[in-house]
Image: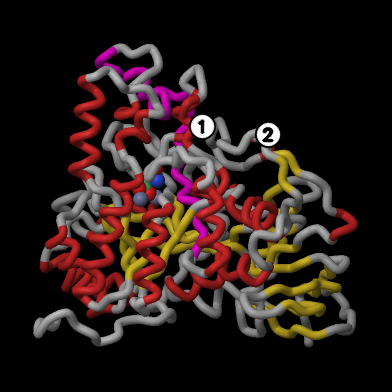
């Protein structure tokens, strides 16, 4: 067999199955799954001791070294080395990050610029989603198809943020191109005009404290935009993924569309399943640490609605939305104290950069709070953590499963007899952010090893990342293999 690595005594979990086996790896790929693979000279062996082995995590929503959405001059805490080290230490072996088109510029230029930031620096495998801000004819019908050929098969559009948002007609232009070139479209659903109106009104009343970020965008802001995005997808008969869903009303709207058999997919994030709006009310400006969009929701019971959607299949993927800015940084969360025209001593939510760090804690939170606390099955964990993102974004079965021929990307978990509680502390994490929103939270487990293409890249016994910058590979992705257009129309109109 001439193997490079044997993982012994594993209980392999995939999106469908769970079985005891050894795993034989050759040239970075899984070669054989069988009990009792014979030992061979020069082949490394790792004893999983009966522990679970799941596919390496695929985090399909990560912002690294990206210009900030609010246009405040905020800087990303992570560069491509720290951000991807953090991914590996939490069991994630593939990330999809964003390349933003500044309005009036070219998608291809944006991708080239972002490649410069990542290519010699990433330690995990990666790809890019486009963020489209200017869906004109040239961009959508000359540049986009070229990028699809280069393996960039997904794009995100925003319904909010002045620098990024598209109107409904522009979104239709994007969806028509997405349908034609088989590109997965992700939509950030929040109603921009309501947020702007509310923000101005709150400023006039001096209600600028961090938690009024939540006041300015109540659940209806998300659910209205979600409903509108789904209507546009139905009109164009095209699949769509709604990103970072937080409001139960939005979950219900998505579920209803899925029940009507529309090809609608949904993403939620660790923070919506484990934190709530009370985080934004913490003293000493600490609330700014949890300002993100959509906001954490005020009703603590909403977290259980998110878990329901994770368990029952409404959510397709579970992504971090890692968007780190430091807390104690004049170009981070502190902007909310510095750019503070009303001098409210508690700061101004309008100038706090949105986003939380979370690429490292995503998988351990889903495993511990989800599987080990009995909220989701191990198979559902694998779907949400790896398989569905690999299918939706055109990487399956190279990524997202454990089967002969797939990349040998593995998380080896501690066996039951070795499991011990793990306290989340920022000092243990590998990102370059100066805080974690989960400080002090107790987990039931943490990855024992992360393996990327057959190499041990994270050792949980020493908490060390062992991969060298530049060892991560850019992934040339294909089209989604989840259900697509249905050829059902709302009128006589058809796209070209
Ligand atoms: O607050 C967030 N999520 N910031 C990142 C940008 C985005 O919209 O995903
Ligand atoms: Zn977003
Ligand atoms: Zn995001």
State the image coordinates of residue 329 (x, y, percent, origin top left). Answer: 45, 24
Examine the rendered structure and indicate whether residue 179 appears above or below residue 219.
Answer: below
Question: In terms of image quadrants, where is residue 20?
Answer: bottom right
Magenta region: which residues?
A: 317-342
What's the residue at 55%, 80% (across, down)?
A: 397
* Magenta stretch holds residue 340: yes
Q: Residues within 10 Å of mark 2 (few under 14, many from 20)?
A: few
Q: Residues within 10 Å of mark 1 (few under 14, many from 20)?
A: many
Instruction: Give the residue at mark 2.
Output: 440
Q: Is residue 378 left or right of residue 472?
A: right
Examine the rendered structure and indicate whether residue 208 appears above or below residue 326.
Answer: above
State the image coordinates of residue 401 (x, y, percent, origin top left). Answer: 61, 75
Instruction: Give the residue at mark 1.
Output: 279
In this rendered view, identify the residue nearer to me: 399 or 235.
Answer: 235
Q: Is residue 97 left or right of residue 380?
A: left
Where disc 1 sits, the SS reads helix
What's the residue at 84%, 61% (across, down)?
A: 415
State the image coordinates of residue 387 (x, y, percent, origin top left). Answer: 55, 72
Choose the circle earlier in sequence order: 2 or 1. Answer: 1
Q: Is residue 335 left or right of residue 121?
A: left
């Amino acid at each position: 067999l001439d193997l490079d690595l044997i993982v012994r005594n594993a209980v392999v979990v995939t999106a469908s199955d769970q079985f005891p086996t050894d795993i034989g790896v050759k040239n970075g790929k899984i070669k054989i799954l069988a009990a009792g693979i014979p030992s061979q000279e020069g082949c490394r062996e790792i004893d999983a001791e009966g522990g679970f082995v799941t596919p390496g995590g695929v985090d399909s929503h990560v912002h690294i070294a990206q210009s900030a959405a609010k246009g405040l001059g905020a800087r990303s805490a992570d560069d491509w080395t720290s951000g991807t080290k953090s991914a590996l230490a939490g069991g994630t072996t593939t990330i999809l990050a964003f390349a933003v088109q500044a309005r009036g510029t070219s998608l291809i230029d944006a991708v080239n610029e972002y490649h410069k930031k990542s290519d010699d620096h990433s330690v995990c495998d990666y790809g890019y989603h486009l963020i489209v801000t200017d869906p004109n004819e040239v961009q959508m019908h000359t540049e986009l198809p070229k990028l699809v050929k280069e393996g960039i098969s997904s794009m995100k559009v925003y319904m909010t943020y002045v620098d990024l948002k598209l109107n409904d007609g522009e979104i239709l232009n994007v969806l028509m191109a997405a349908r034609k070139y088989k590109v997965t479209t992700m939509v950030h659903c929040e109603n921009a005009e309501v947020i702007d109106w509310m923000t101005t009104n709150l400023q006039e009343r001096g209600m600028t404290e961090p938690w009024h970020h939540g006041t300015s965008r109540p659940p209806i802001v998300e659910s209205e935009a979600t409903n509108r995005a789904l209507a546009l997808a139905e009109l164009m008969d095209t699949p769509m993924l709604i990103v970072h869903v937080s409001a139960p009303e939005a979950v219900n709207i998505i579920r209803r569309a899925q029940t009507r058999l529309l090809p609608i997919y949904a993403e939620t994030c660790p923070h919506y399943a484990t934190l709530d709006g009370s985080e934004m009310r913490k003293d000493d400006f600490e609330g700014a640490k949890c300002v993100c969009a959509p906001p954490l929701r005020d009703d603590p019971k909403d977290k259980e609605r998110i878990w329901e959607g994770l368990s029952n299949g409404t959510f397709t993927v579970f992504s971090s939305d890692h968007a780190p800015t430091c807390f104690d940084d004049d170009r981070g969360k502190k902007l909310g104290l510095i750019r503070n025209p009303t001098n409210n001593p508690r700061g101004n939510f309008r100038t706090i950069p949105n986003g939380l760090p979370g690429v490292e804690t995503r998988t351990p939170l889903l495993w511990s709070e989800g599987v080990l606390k009995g909220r989701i099955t191990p198979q559902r964990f694998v779907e949400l953590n790896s398989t569905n993102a690999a299918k939706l974004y055109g990487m399956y079965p190279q990524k997202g499963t454990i089967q002969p021929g797939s990349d040998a990307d593995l998380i080896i978990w501690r066996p039951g007899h070795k499991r011990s509680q793990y306290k989340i502390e920022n000092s243990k994490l590998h990102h370059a952010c100066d805080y974690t929103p989960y400080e002090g939270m107790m987990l039931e487990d943490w990855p024992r090893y992360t393996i990327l293409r057959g190499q041990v890249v994270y050792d949980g016994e020493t908490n060390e990342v062992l991969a060298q910058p530049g060892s991560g590979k850019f992934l040339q992705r294909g089209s989604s293999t989840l259900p697509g257009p249905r050829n059902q129309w709302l009128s006589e109109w058809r796209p070209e």
